Amino acid sequence: MTEHKLSTKELQQHKVDIRTQVWQELRKVALPDSRFHWDFAEFIADFQGSENSTNFILKSDFFNNSINLENNKFNLIFITPDNCLESLRFECLKNGIPFLMTTYGIKRGFFLIDPSKINKDLYLYASTLDGMEKLGKHVTLKDLKDLNVFIPLMITGTGAINDKGIRFGKGHGFFDLEWAMLSTINCIDIINTKCVAVVHDVQLLTNIELKPEIFDTVCDYIVTNTKIINVENAKKPNCGVLWDVLAPGMLQDIEPLEELYKMTH
Protein backbone atom coordinates (compact mmCIF):
# COMPACT_ATOMS: atom_id res chain seq x y z
CA MET A 1 0.00 0.00 0.00
CA THR A 2 1.35 3.42 -0.95
CA GLU A 3 1.85 5.74 2.03
CA HIS A 4 -0.41 8.79 1.84
CA LYS A 5 1.59 12.01 1.69
CA LEU A 6 -0.12 14.91 3.38
CA SER A 7 -0.81 17.95 1.25
CA THR A 8 0.15 21.42 2.44
CA LYS A 9 -3.47 22.03 3.45
CA GLU A 10 -3.58 18.73 5.35
CA LEU A 11 -0.29 19.54 7.09
CA GLN A 12 -1.62 22.90 8.21
CA GLN A 13 -4.80 21.28 9.54
CA HIS A 14 -2.67 18.66 11.31
CA LYS A 15 -0.79 21.45 13.08
CA VAL A 16 -4.08 23.11 14.06
CA ASP A 17 -5.38 19.85 15.54
CA ILE A 18 -2.17 19.34 17.53
CA ARG A 19 -2.20 22.90 18.86
CA THR A 20 -5.79 22.49 19.99
CA GLN A 21 -4.98 19.28 21.88
CA VAL A 22 -1.89 20.74 23.52
CA TRP A 23 -3.55 23.99 24.50
CA GLN A 24 -6.23 22.10 26.43
CA GLU A 25 -3.48 20.67 28.63
CA LEU A 26 -1.45 23.87 28.66
CA ARG A 27 -4.28 25.83 30.23
CA LYS A 28 -3.89 23.67 33.36
CA VAL A 29 -0.31 24.92 33.92
CA ALA A 30 -0.13 28.20 31.97
CA LEU A 31 -0.18 31.71 33.39
CA PRO A 32 -2.70 34.01 31.67
CA ASP A 33 -1.55 37.06 29.75
CA SER A 34 -2.63 40.50 30.96
CA ARG A 35 -3.95 41.37 27.50
CA PHE A 36 -4.82 38.07 25.81
CA HIS A 37 -5.93 36.09 28.87
CA TRP A 38 -6.06 32.40 27.70
CA ASP A 39 -5.98 32.99 23.94
CA PHE A 40 -2.90 30.93 23.11
CA ALA A 41 -3.27 31.83 19.43
CA GLU A 42 -2.16 35.36 20.32
CA PHE A 43 0.71 34.82 22.75
CA ILE A 44 3.19 32.21 23.99
CA ALA A 45 2.33 31.60 27.62
CA ASP A 46 4.49 31.52 30.69
CA PHE A 47 3.94 28.39 32.74
CA GLN A 48 4.45 26.82 36.12
CA GLY A 49 8.10 25.83 36.48
CA SER A 50 9.49 28.15 33.81
CA GLU A 51 12.14 29.26 36.31
CA ASN A 52 13.54 25.71 36.02
CA SER A 53 13.81 26.13 32.26
CA THR A 54 15.67 29.40 32.79
CA ASN A 55 18.13 27.76 35.17
CA PHE A 56 18.72 24.87 32.75
CA ILE A 57 19.58 27.35 30.01
CA LEU A 58 21.87 29.49 32.16
CA LYS A 59 23.87 26.42 33.21
CA SER A 60 24.01 24.84 29.76
CA ASP A 61 27.07 24.57 27.56
CA PHE A 62 25.19 25.89 24.53
CA PHE A 63 24.31 29.10 26.37
CA ASN A 64 27.69 29.69 28.00
CA ASN A 65 29.60 28.87 24.83
CA SER A 66 27.46 31.43 23.00
CA ILE A 67 28.02 34.29 25.42
CA ASN A 68 31.75 33.54 25.64
CA LEU A 69 32.29 33.16 21.90
CA GLU A 70 35.46 34.82 20.67
CA ASN A 71 35.54 36.26 17.18
CA ASN A 72 35.73 39.67 15.53
CA LYS A 73 31.95 40.08 15.60
CA PHE A 74 29.53 41.77 17.99
CA ASN A 75 28.00 38.58 19.43
CA LEU A 76 24.41 38.80 20.65
CA ILE A 77 21.97 36.12 21.67
CA PHE A 78 18.44 36.54 20.37
CA ILE A 79 15.46 36.04 22.70
CA THR A 80 11.89 36.23 21.48
CA PRO A 81 9.37 38.39 23.41
CA ASP A 82 7.48 35.34 24.70
CA ASN A 83 6.10 35.36 28.24
CA CYS A 84 7.91 32.15 29.22
CA LEU A 85 11.26 33.85 28.51
CA GLU A 86 10.78 36.92 30.70
CA SER A 87 12.76 35.43 33.58
CA LEU A 88 15.58 34.50 31.19
CA ARG A 89 15.71 38.06 29.89
CA PHE A 90 15.83 39.32 33.48
CA GLU A 91 18.69 36.95 34.38
CA CYS A 92 20.64 38.03 31.29
CA LEU A 93 20.34 41.65 32.35
CA LYS A 94 21.43 40.85 35.91
CA ASN A 95 24.45 38.99 34.53
CA GLY A 96 25.47 41.81 32.19
CA ILE A 97 24.52 39.94 29.01
CA PRO A 98 23.08 42.10 26.20
CA PHE A 99 20.55 40.52 23.87
CA LEU A 100 18.44 41.20 20.83
CA MET A 101 14.67 40.81 20.79
CA THR A 102 11.68 41.86 18.74
CA THR A 103 8.50 43.72 19.48
CA TYR A 104 5.23 41.81 19.59
CA GLY A 105 4.54 40.39 16.12
CA ILE A 106 7.85 41.97 14.94
CA LYS A 107 5.77 44.97 13.85
CA ARG A 108 8.16 47.62 15.18
CA GLY A 109 11.21 45.52 14.55
CA PHE A 110 14.24 44.69 16.66
CA PHE A 111 15.49 46.12 19.94
CA LEU A 112 18.92 45.84 21.51
CA ILE A 113 18.67 45.43 25.27
CA ASP A 114 22.00 46.37 26.83
CA PRO A 115 22.24 46.15 30.63
CA SER A 116 25.16 48.61 30.66
CA LYS A 117 22.74 51.28 29.37
CA ILE A 118 19.96 50.55 31.89
CA ASN A 119 19.65 51.38 35.59
CA LYS A 120 19.89 48.13 37.57
CA ASP A 121 16.70 48.99 39.44
CA LEU A 122 14.87 48.83 36.10
CA TYR A 123 16.15 45.44 34.92
CA LEU A 124 12.92 43.65 35.81
CA TYR A 125 10.88 46.21 33.89
CA ALA A 126 13.31 46.08 30.97
CA SER A 127 12.74 42.33 30.68
CA THR A 128 9.05 42.90 29.87
CA LEU A 129 7.53 43.80 26.52
CA ASP A 130 6.51 47.26 27.69
CA GLY A 131 9.83 47.97 29.38
CA MET A 132 12.10 46.83 26.60
CA GLU A 133 10.69 49.42 24.20
CA LYS A 134 11.28 52.23 26.69
CA LEU A 135 14.68 51.10 27.92
CA GLY A 136 16.12 49.28 24.92
CA LYS A 137 17.46 50.71 21.66
CA HIS A 138 15.58 50.23 18.41
CA VAL A 139 17.86 48.83 15.70
CA THR A 140 17.18 48.39 12.00
CA LEU A 141 18.52 45.57 9.86
CA LYS A 142 21.05 48.05 8.47
CA ASP A 143 22.11 48.84 12.05
CA LEU A 144 22.68 45.15 12.73
CA LYS A 145 24.83 44.85 9.63
CA ASP A 146 26.79 48.01 10.48
CA LEU A 147 27.35 46.75 14.04
CA ASN A 148 28.77 43.50 12.59
CA VAL A 149 26.37 41.47 14.70
CA PHE A 150 26.57 37.69 14.84
CA ILE A 151 23.90 35.66 16.65
CA PRO A 152 25.17 32.27 17.84
CA LEU A 153 22.00 31.41 19.76
CA MET A 154 18.29 32.04 19.19
CA ILE A 155 15.86 31.22 22.00
CA THR A 156 12.11 31.03 21.52
CA GLY A 157 8.96 29.86 23.20
CA THR A 158 6.44 27.92 21.14
CA GLY A 159 2.95 26.51 21.25
CA ALA A 160 4.13 22.91 21.00
CA ILE A 161 7.12 20.97 19.72
CA ASN A 162 7.86 17.37 18.87
CA ASP A 163 10.95 15.53 20.06
CA LYS A 164 12.58 16.07 16.66
CA GLY A 165 12.67 19.82 17.25
CA ILE A 166 9.84 20.71 14.87
CA ARG A 167 7.81 23.55 16.36
CA PHE A 168 4.09 24.17 16.30
CA GLY A 169 3.88 27.86 17.14
CA LYS A 170 0.89 30.19 17.21
CA GLY A 171 0.54 29.70 13.48
CA HIS A 172 1.91 33.08 12.35
CA GLY A 173 5.47 31.96 11.50
CA PHE A 174 7.18 34.84 13.30
CA PHE A 175 10.25 32.88 14.47
CA ASP A 176 10.79 31.47 10.99
CA LEU A 177 10.50 34.99 9.62
CA GLU A 178 13.04 36.30 12.16
CA TRP A 179 15.43 33.52 11.12
CA ALA A 180 14.89 34.33 7.45
CA MET A 181 15.53 38.06 7.87
CA LEU A 182 18.60 37.62 10.07
CA SER A 183 20.08 34.97 7.79
CA THR A 184 19.58 37.18 4.73
CA ILE A 185 21.74 39.90 6.30
CA ASN A 186 24.30 37.29 7.48
CA CYS A 187 23.77 37.79 11.21
CA ILE A 188 23.25 34.05 11.57
CA ASP A 189 24.32 30.97 9.65
CA ILE A 190 22.82 27.52 9.32
CA ILE A 191 25.85 25.75 10.81
CA ASN A 192 26.94 27.83 13.78
CA THR A 193 23.68 29.39 14.99
CA LYS A 194 21.77 27.11 17.34
CA CYS A 195 18.07 27.37 18.19
CA VAL A 196 16.44 26.60 21.52
CA ALA A 197 12.73 26.07 22.21
CA VAL A 198 11.36 26.53 25.72
CA VAL A 199 8.14 24.71 26.61
CA HIS A 200 6.32 23.01 29.47
CA ASP A 201 6.36 19.21 29.46
CA VAL A 202 2.72 19.17 28.30
CA GLN A 203 3.80 20.99 25.13
CA LEU A 204 6.40 18.35 24.24
CA LEU A 205 5.03 15.80 21.78
CA THR A 206 6.42 12.30 21.35
CA ASN A 207 5.66 9.91 18.50
CA ILE A 208 4.27 12.79 16.44
CA GLU A 209 5.99 12.75 13.07
CA LEU A 210 5.89 15.76 10.79
CA LYS A 211 8.21 16.69 7.97
CA PRO A 212 9.31 20.31 8.33
CA GLU A 213 8.34 22.67 5.55
CA ILE A 214 11.04 24.50 3.61
CA PHE A 215 10.85 27.55 5.89
CA ASP A 216 10.58 25.72 9.24
CA THR A 217 13.40 26.44 11.69
CA VAL A 218 14.04 23.18 13.53
CA CYS A 219 15.42 23.58 17.06
CA ASP A 220 18.69 22.07 18.25
CA TYR A 221 17.63 22.01 21.89
CA ILE A 222 14.30 21.66 23.69
CA VAL A 223 14.22 22.95 27.26
CA THR A 224 11.24 22.06 29.44
CA ASN A 225 10.49 22.60 33.11
CA THR A 226 12.16 19.24 33.85
CA LYS A 227 14.82 18.53 31.21
CA ILE A 228 16.92 19.44 28.18
CA ILE A 229 16.65 17.43 24.96
CA ASN A 230 19.45 17.59 22.41
CA VAL A 231 18.11 17.22 18.86
CA GLU A 232 20.58 15.66 16.45
CA ASN A 233 21.00 17.11 12.95
CA ALA A 234 18.42 19.86 13.32
CA LYS A 235 17.94 21.31 9.84
CA LYS A 236 17.83 25.05 9.32
CA PRO A 237 16.21 26.79 6.36
CA ASN A 238 18.37 28.64 3.86
CA CYS A 239 15.55 29.84 1.60
CA GLY A 240 15.38 33.34 3.06
CA VAL A 241 12.05 35.14 3.03
CA LEU A 242 9.53 33.54 0.69
CA TRP A 243 7.95 36.77 -0.41
CA ASP A 244 5.20 35.18 -2.46
CA VAL A 245 3.86 33.12 0.45
CA LEU A 246 3.71 35.87 3.07
CA ALA A 247 0.31 36.34 4.66
CA PRO A 248 -1.61 39.37 3.35
CA GLY A 249 -0.50 42.58 5.05
CA MET A 250 2.69 41.15 6.57
CA LEU A 251 5.02 43.11 4.28
CA GLN A 252 3.30 46.38 5.10
CA ASP A 253 2.82 45.69 8.82
CA ILE A 254 6.29 44.37 9.77
CA GLU A 255 8.82 47.18 9.71
CA PRO A 256 12.06 45.19 9.17
CA LEU A 257 10.38 43.02 6.54
CA GLU A 258 9.60 46.10 4.49
CA GLU A 259 13.17 47.31 5.05
CA LEU A 260 14.57 43.98 3.84
CA TYR A 261 12.36 44.02 0.76
CA LYS A 262 13.75 47.42 -0.20
CA MET A 263 17.30 46.18 0.47
CA THR A 264 16.93 43.13 -1.76
CA HIS A 265 14.71 44.34 -4.60
Image: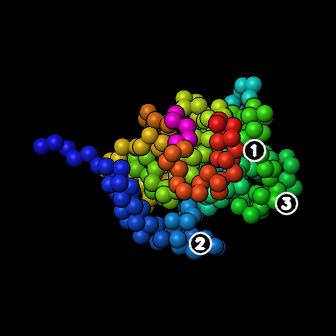
Task: Answer above or below: position of 159 versus 33.
Answer: above
| Location of residue 103 in the rendering, given as x and y in whole percent from the top left corner | 69, 56
x, y (%) of residue 184?
A: 62, 35
Front-lying residue, 104 or 127 = 104
Quarter holding the C terminus? top right
Residue at 57% of width from left, 46% of height from top?
A: 177
Q: Which residue is mark 2?
A: 36
Relative image position of residue 52 (x, y in whole percent): 57, 56
| Residue depth check, mark 3 versus mark 2: number of the one nearer the observer | 2
- Is there any visible trace of residue 132 in the rendered image? yes
Q: Are marks 3 and 2 in contact (CB under 8 Å)?
A: no
Q: Residue furthest front?
A: 265
Left or right of 179 in this view: 101: right
Q: How is the image coloured?
A: rainbow
Instruction: Name the mark on residue 121.
Output: 3
Circle nearer the N terminus (3, 2): 2
Pick the quarter of the image with the N terminus. top left
Please tell me how crowded label 3 is: few (under 14), some (14-19), or many (20+) other residues with Cα within 10 Å.
few
Location of mark 1 (residue): 140
Q: Which residues are magenta?
A: 238-242
